[in-house]
């Protein structure tokens, strides 16, 4: 672990469940919690990548399609049976596929909401009863600053990510009486392998740097660090809010 980063004693032994944990930001979050001594379980559609990461880190993995709510909730239940009811849920799974507003149909629109929004609510529905029994918990929903910046080329994705903030606020109210905290982490443009392969051309990166206050590109571990903080007891009075990790992007 990078010695510049914090260790959170309150995370040791905690049961943590993460969606979309096999690659990108999700894999960094899985790794960060494992390094804190948490009991980590994650769900992903990619069986090969998921099994490989789980083996390397000695954490639990369940393969499931988040669009299939019954299968997804069953996978969450199996993780809770293995590691204990969740203390922390990280709703990370998403895909920022580009699409032209003139060409998408209703089926594509609905599928994008299933990939980027719907599963978050049903994950909360699955794990919150266990948190209520414990009298505490932390739920972290992954947003995006793309809609804050009025970015184009993915209206269905941007709409879903904007809605995440409404989900966070209402569930923070409904669950707060049980000392369950619900927050949104809002990443900027994060340099995952997917982003670098598909969209991070030299021209695009140079243009993006002019929109950030800080000159450095955002690496996945910075998102994971914010997630760790919000999961820890250090953030015990933090709920119903947005936590930006976007280098001051406008």
Image: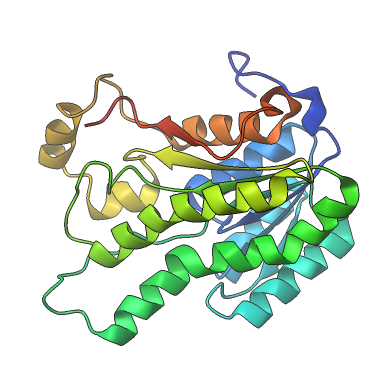
Check the image and report above or below for 152 versus 136: below
Residue for point 35% across, 31% down: 246
Residue 4, how many percent across, how many down?
Answer: 58, 13
Residue for point 65% across, 73% down: 72
Q: Nearer the viewer, residue 123 or 72?
A: 123
In the displayed structure image, the side of residue 43 where residue 219 appears, left or right: left
In the displayed structure image, the side of residue 165 where residue 6 appears, left or right: right
Check the image and report above or below for 101 versus 248: below
- Where the C terminus falls, by quadrant? top left
Single out the residue that lies furthest toward the top: 4
Residue 27, how many percent across, how many down?
Answer: 56, 48
Check the image and report above or below for 248 versus 121: above
Q: Nearer the viewer, residue 229 or 41?
A: 229
- Where the N terminus falls, by quadrant? top right
Residue for point 22% across, 45% down: 200
Q: Nearer the viewer, residue 221 or 229?
A: 229
Check the image and report above or below for 30 versus 156: above
Residue 20, how many percent across, how many down?
Answer: 55, 59
């Amino acid at each position: 672990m990078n010695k510049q980063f914090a260790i959170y004693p309150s995370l040791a032994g905690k049961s943590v469940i993460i969606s979309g944990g096999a690659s990108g930001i999700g894999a960094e979050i899985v790794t960060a919690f494992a390094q804190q001594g948490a009991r980590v379980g994650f769900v992903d559609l990619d069986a090969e990548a998921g099994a490989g990461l789980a083996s390397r880190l000695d954490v639990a993995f369940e393969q499931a399609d988040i669009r299939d709510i019954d299968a997804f909730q069953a996978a969450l239940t199996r993780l809770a049976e293995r590691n204990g009811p969740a203390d922390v849920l990280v709703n990370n799974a998403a895909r920022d596929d580009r699409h032209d507003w003139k060409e998408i149909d209703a089926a594509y629109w609905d599928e994008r909401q299933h990939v980027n929004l719907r599963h978050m609510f049903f994950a909360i529905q699955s794990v919150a009863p266990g948190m209520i029994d414990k009298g505490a918990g932390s739920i972290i929903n992954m947003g995006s600053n793309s809609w804050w910046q009025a970015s184009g080329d993915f209206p269905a994705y941007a709409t879903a990510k904007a809605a995440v903030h409404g989900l966070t606020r209402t569930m923070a109210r409904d669950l707060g009486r049980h000392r369950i905290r619900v927050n949104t982490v809002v990443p900027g443009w994060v340099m995952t392998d997917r982003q670098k392969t598909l969209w991070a051309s030299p021209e695009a990166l140079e243009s993006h740097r002019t929109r950030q206050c800080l000159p450095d590109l955002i690496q996945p571990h910075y998102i994971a660090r914010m997630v760790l903080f919000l999961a820890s007891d250090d953030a015990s009075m933090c709920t119903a809010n947005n936590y930006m990790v976007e280098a001051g992007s406008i």
